[in-house]
Image (cartoon, grey):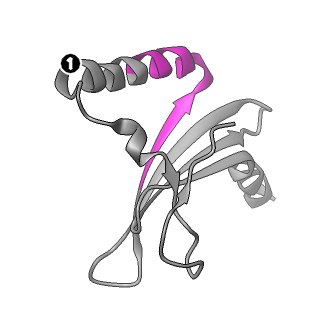
């Protein structure tokens, strides 16, 4: 019986995947706890060079930290864009990568 609750706790109620090159993918998942609360998991998945497996790194962000997390993330990204690399064209990388087996070239990103 206890295992059923653990499975419930791990269910994703929302998921967004971002392909970032041929070997790296980010997953943003909203998950529900046993107490009907929600938290965010951010997972980086990288394909290993030496095998068929993947390395995964996961961050858990809880609702009470959402605003602080987003503020710090935006500040760090803004610092890189404005202070460290003001002449770099970050928009040149706004494209989606095809799924495995869909072909070789990228598909331009459509902001909506």
Q: Please, what secondary structure does the residue beneath circle 1 have?
A: helix
Q: Which residues are magenta?
A: 57-72
Residue 19: x %, y % from top left: 50, 58
x 35%, y 26%: residue = 77
Residue visible at 68% across and 48% down in the picture = 15
Write down the residue under mark 1: 83
Is the stretch drawn in magenta largely helix, strand or loop? helix
**Which of the two residues, 45 or 31, is positioned nearer the viewer here?**
45
Q: Nearer the viewer, residue 88 or 4?
A: 88
> In screen coordinates, is 45 left or right of 98?
left
Position above or below: 16 against 40: below
Tag count:
1
Residue 57, image x, y percentages: 40, 53
For the residue pair 46 and 22, the one nearer the viewer reads as 22
Looking at the image, the residue that sits furthest to the left is 84
Question: What percent of the width, then of the height, locates residue 67?
Answer: 54, 15
Tell me which residue sits at (80%, 32%) in the image.
36
The location of residue 27, given as percent across then percent down, is 55, 51
Residue 63 within the magenta-colored segment of the rendering: yes
Q: Nearer the viewer, residue 29 or 33?
A: 29
């Amino acid at each position: 019986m206890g295992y059923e609750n653990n499975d419930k706790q791990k269910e994703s109620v929302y998921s967004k995947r971002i392909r970032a090159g041929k070997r790296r993918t980010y997953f943003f998942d909203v998950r529900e706890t046993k107490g009907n609360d929600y938290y965010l998991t951010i997972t980086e998945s990288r394909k290993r060079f030496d095998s068929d497996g993947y390395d995964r790194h996961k961050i858990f962000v809880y609702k009470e930290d959402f605003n602080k997390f987003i503020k710090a993330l935006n500040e760090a990204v803004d610092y890189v864009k404005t202070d460290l690399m003001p002449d770099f064209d970050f928009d040149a990388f706004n494209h989606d990568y095809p799924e495995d087996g869909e072909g070789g070239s990228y598909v331009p990103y459509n902001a909506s």
